[in-house]
Image (cartoon, rainbow, N blue to C red):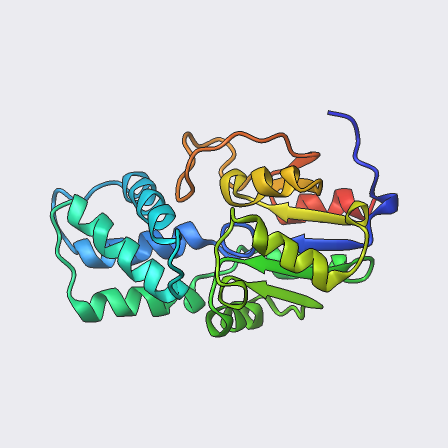
Amino acid sequence: MARFDFGRIEILTFDCYGTLIDWEAGIAAGFRKAFGSRSDRPPDEAVLEAYARHEARAEKPPYLRYRDVAGRSFAAACREFGVEPGIHEVRAFGESVGDWPAFTDSAAALARLAGRFRLGVITNCDDDLFARSEARLGARFTWVVTAEQVGSYKPDPRNFWAAIERIGAPTDRILHVAQSLYHDHVPARRLGLATAWIDRRSGRPGFGATPPAEATPDLTSHDMATFAEVALA
């Protein structure tokens, strides 16, 4: 792959969950709690894949808040493995999104990138849950576009169009940075945006908590620290 030219890029838009926040760790922790000490507890990869299937269905119209999408997906995946979660467990899982941990390199990378680029977020989340994640990242984004604001979820192109309209810059000045091929790279590329893939699952098989998809990003890094090095070189 040819070296990407950052000279024309003024704005970086980010996916949050999976790219900056370790959502697979947060999701898996919630399932481990639900399954407890059961000897037949499924492996994390199996529950992540189940969650991905159910989340993709729950994010189709009509719109639900993400905490409800997450709770519904959690409950459906639990049932696949013979566990019936209580209503309080389901609600707690949905609310836990704001407590999911940041990747250890995210905050420092964002701080470095903010010295050169303007930063935005396009996230499949509720406003208040993302605000908790933003505080965890120690970052202030110039533009925040949530699913709650748009009333739809990526890969719906409306979420990207909302961001492009708010930013008000030519699309060739924007680079979208994300982990999920399904949610981010496929629709962003269709709209003519350049994309950078943060391949957080490098070396692991499968797609984890995102549905399978194919896309051709403009550049690939395995983590945010490496991406920042490349972008600022």
Q: Position of residue 171 (x, y in %)?
A: 77, 48
Q: Is residue 102 shown left or right of residue 64?
A: right
Establish if 133 lies above or below 28: below
The residue positioned 41% from the left and 38% from the top of the image is 211
Q: Position of residue 221 (x, y in %)?
A: 64, 38
Question: In which quarter of the view is residue 223 placed?
Answer: top right
**Residue lying farthest right?**
7
Q: Is residue 133 shown left or right of residue 24?
A: right
**Residue lying farthest top?**
1
Location of the C terminus (image quadrant): top right
Q: Is residue 135 shown left or right of residue 29?
A: right
Q: Position of residue 183 (x, y in %)?
A: 51, 45
* Camera-nearest residue between 231 and 155: 155
The residue positioned 70% from the left and 34% from the top of the image is 218
Q: Position of residue 45 (x, y in %)?
A: 32, 39
Q: Is residue 6 shown left or right of residue 134?
A: right
The residue positioned 44% from the left and 32% from the top of the image is 204
* Camera-nearest residue between 221 and 146: 146
Location of the N terminus (image quadrant): top right
Count of marks placed on residues: 0
The residue positioned 60% from the left and 63% from the top of the image is 145
